[in-house]
Amino acid sequence: MTRQELFENIKKKQSFLCVGLDTDIKKIPQHLLQEEDPIFEFNKAIIEATAPYCVAYKPNLAFYEAFGVKGMISFEKTIKYLKTNHPDQFIVADAKRGDIGNTSSMYARTFFEEYDVDSLTVAPYMGEDSVSPFLKYEGKWVILLALTSNKGSLDFQFMEDEDGQRLFEKVLTTSQNWGNADNMMYVVGATQGSMFEDIRRIVPDHFLLVPGIGAQGGSLEEVCKYGMNSTCGLLVNSSRAIIYADNTENFAEVAGQKAKEVQLQMAAQLAKL
């Protein structure tokens, strides 16, 4: 999916919502445990209820790998279901891969050839040769970790060099030599607030994947105020606040309602463009 196609879908749906499929079998409604594949059945119901209100889905690999082969089968079935039934949805594999070049090449083959997802989250710590294998796939996106929403982001990401440049700023500036706004996005946590202003000075045109609204307490209005650009430039993720909003047999309906509430807020923000 191209950047223009993504923006057109954002305009059509009046939404830049990404629904995180962090599916934990211990949290899904009990009646689904009778199914042959409870994780997939949960995902399918969530997708059908929320698809009208979002433009992307982000399955987090940890929640599938935790169940071994069965979990990965559920992941693969979820991807195939999305591609068959909702081909307009942008699929983010949240796997945070990144290793020496030949290992990264195999990770890239896994996600871009075998699973054929649109994008993959990648850790930049090991530098250019660990990221470049992912950028060789035309039409695919690398989503590079830049400034995260967790408490531990303070441990390293704000460290300054002798010129006063913070580490997350170094990631943003250096990675401009690897990819561009048509094949690279950045993860920036919603809880970082006005820090988006600093980020936009370095990467004014790139899309940002923004986790942290909803259960983590990030402000959508603040993210949009400082992070939105002329083509929106945002994919804002919500996981728990949508998919676990209800634990009864009405879980999918409630998830759809929660997604619609966010979509309406996003439509109001898009009207300001």
Image: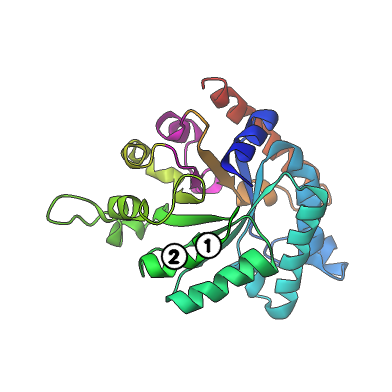
- Which residue is labeled 1 in the image? 136
Left or right: residue 264 versus residue 159 is right
Image: magenta residue range: 205-229
Q: Quadrant of residue 69?
A: bottom right
Question: Is any atom of residue 235 visible in this view?
Answer: yes
Q: Is residue 180 left or right of residue 83?
A: left
Indicate whether residue 219 is drawn in magenta: yes
Label 1: which secondary element: helix
1 vs 2, front mark: 1
Return the disc, 1 or 2, that comes first in the chain's sequence: 2
Residue at x 78%, y 58% (from the top left corner): 42
Q: Nearer the viewer, residue 172 or 216?
A: 172
List x then y, in percent, for residue 246: 73, 48
* Residue 248 covered by magenta stretch: no
Relative image position of residue 24 (x, y in whole percent): 67, 64
Marking on residue 225: none
Amino acid residing under circle 1:
Lys
Height in image: 178 above or below 131? above
Q: Amino acid at mark 2?
A: Val
Residue beneath disc 2: 131
Is any atom of residue 29 visible in this view?
Answer: no
Mark 1 and 2 residues: CB-CB less than 8 Å, in contact? no
> Does 172 sit above or below residue 28?
above
How far across and down, in percent of the image, does residue 22 sit?
63, 59
Task: Tell me the quarter of the picture where residue 36 sits.
Answer: bottom right
- For label 2, the SS is helix
